Image (spheres, rainbow, N blue to C red):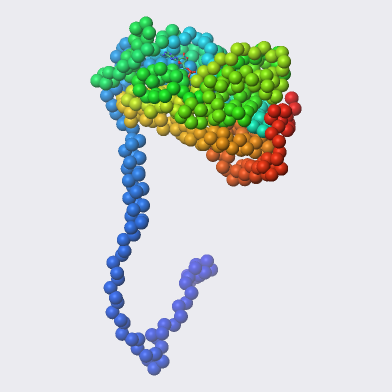
Amino acid sequence: MHTRSPRTRARSPPPRPARALSRPRSQRGPPPPPARPREPRPPPRPAPRAVGVGAAVAGYGIYKYATTRVPSSGPYGPGTLPADAYDVVIVGAGPSGSTCGYYAAKAGAKVALLDKEVFPRDKYCGDAVCALAIHTLRDMGVMQELEAHGEAHYADSGGFVSPSGICYIGRSEKKLGEAAAAGVKRINLDKRIAWKARDTGCDLKERFEVTDAKFDKGAGMWTVTAADNKTVRARLLVCADGATSRLATKLGYCTEAPAGVCSRAFVKGGTHNTDFDGVCFYQRESLPGYSAIFKHPNDELNYCYYLIPTGKDGQCGDVKESDLPRLHNDAIKKDPFISRALGPNAEIERMKAAPLRLGGQGLRQNHDDHLIIVGDAAGHIDPLTGEGIHTAILGGKAAAEVLLSMRQTGDFSKRSTAQYNRKVDQLFAHDFFASKLMAQAIYRAPILMDAVASETQRQGDPMMAKWAEVMTNMRPKTFFLRPDIALNLGYAIVREAIEQYVFRKPDRYAEGGSVVATYNA
Ligand SMILES: Cc1cc2nc3c(=O)[nH]c(=O)nc-3n(C[C@H](O)[C@H](O)[C@H](O)COP(=O)(O)OP(=O)(O)OC[C@H]3O[C@@H](n4cnc5c(N)ncnc54)[C@H](O)[C@@H]3O)c2cc1C
């Protein structure tokens, strides 16, 4: 006989209760009242809000698709380039132009890389090369060459001094797992990148001072002309000619002169007292600008003074570009922190200076048909820190990637070059707005910098490492809004406000700070 297994039995449904209908007729209740005719259901009400939101989302999706769609084919595909022309002509072989040239040539593009100077050539700069640049330079093999020639000094000990003289100098490399920056003289950095681009296949033409560029729409071809009337033809023009960008100005993309400025002076190794790798000094008078000392190999220093614009009227906080020589030279003698770091015997180079175009200032657009603008020419300098080597390098690489994809599709129109704008936005330009806000905030409320400094003194190197990450663009400025950081900073602001406004804590900058340093060399 077939028996069910206990498992099968366990699964069988429980016995049903006896149905009311099976009861005898006498025990049944009164018959149910006749069912009332159902009222007709009201027609479903339209949900106007849901429909509106749906339409808006769909509309935005269609708009986004329509405006960001990249053509998959065009008239200038492989095999269409005339023998005497290049895929790209890059005007300016600084970090942005040479990086663009390197990555384009490495992938097989035909590249003309033009510069009015002959490498090695000097470039006035603070020489602090941030970690994001170091990563790409390593990928290019440039960092290895700089190291092999003893031309890079990785920063470990560093910090900053706040407007009321609260100072913290600590170590960040251990916490970050890498140096936040390296000191590299631009004469060495730019030479190594340009030569790397040349050795990878770029046609590096030096003493080629570009005076004009004309676009032939019918042929989809640029003709770039030098001062001595030599010409170069190419499908794509990359403007990488620096902050004053004569070319982008001539072509009408750049409409203003750069609004920021920075000085530089080298200090001879062995003549100073500096024992840290990099410190920024936020003097109250020139906020949101600051001065800085960065260390190079061979104990040399770079002393520089950044003036960061805060308005359209040429103002950099309460000072102007014309104040730079006074601020630069006074700080060497009178700033207690700087004069102590330099000492009485420092052999200091005469001040040099160059403009800064920050946060895309004065640029109508950074791309067009067959055209991309990179680096300082595009205003790709962080509007809070004045640093632009890493953004130049990242932007140069992004431009090369876009060129390579356009070479495949054959479309060099603005729709295709717009990919470059989206890339740089994603890489770093999204942070420019927050940087500008922070610069304004520091200018209007210097107590914010005091609070950051006092919080850094309280927490030590972990907070210093976070500050270094944000100031070198390893993290966006919004990192400070993370609850664990924002709460501590908020508390520090309240603490400083009470100490400064209620207990009248004195400004100690002039006498060399309340706490000089927590760094032990
Ligand atoms: C004083 C100072 C301090 C700075 N400190 C720092 C710092 O510490 N860290 C940091 O990250 N950034 C710093 N910056 C910013 C940094 O220097 C720039 O962001 C960076 O140099 C941008 O590189 P680039 O290739 O776009 O332009 P550039 O380095 O300016 O290169 C432009 C090139 O174009 C060439 N050129 C110009 N016109 C023509 C022409 N008509 N024809 C042919 N070639 C031409 C030039 O010769 C040059 O080689 C500082 C800037 C200044 C001024």
* Percent coordinates x, y for residue 201 in the rendering: 43, 13
Residue at coordinates 35% horizontally, 14% vertically from top-left? 212
Name the foreground residue: 491 vs 238. Answer: 491
Name the foreground residue: 234 vs 445. Answer: 445
Query: Is residue 510 visible from the viewing direction of this image?
Result: yes
Residue at coordinates 44% horizontally, 17% vertically from top-left? 241
* Left or right of residue 14: residue 447: right
Residue at coordinates 33% horizontally, 19% vertically from top-left? 235
Which image quadrant for residue 100? top left
Q: Which residue lies furthest to the left in this view?
A: 218
Residue at coordinates 41% horizontally, 9% vertically from top-left? 208
Name the foreground residue: 444 vs 210. Answer: 444
286 relative to 36, above or below = above
Name the foreground residue: 205 vs 310. Answer: 310
* Percent coordinates x, y for residue 195 in the rendering: 49, 12
* Left or right of residue 271: residue 15: left
Quadrant for the C terminus, please: top right
* Percent coordinates x, y for residue 124 in the rendering: 54, 16
Count of numbered circles on the image? 0
Query: Is residue 179 visible from the viewing direction of this image?
Result: no
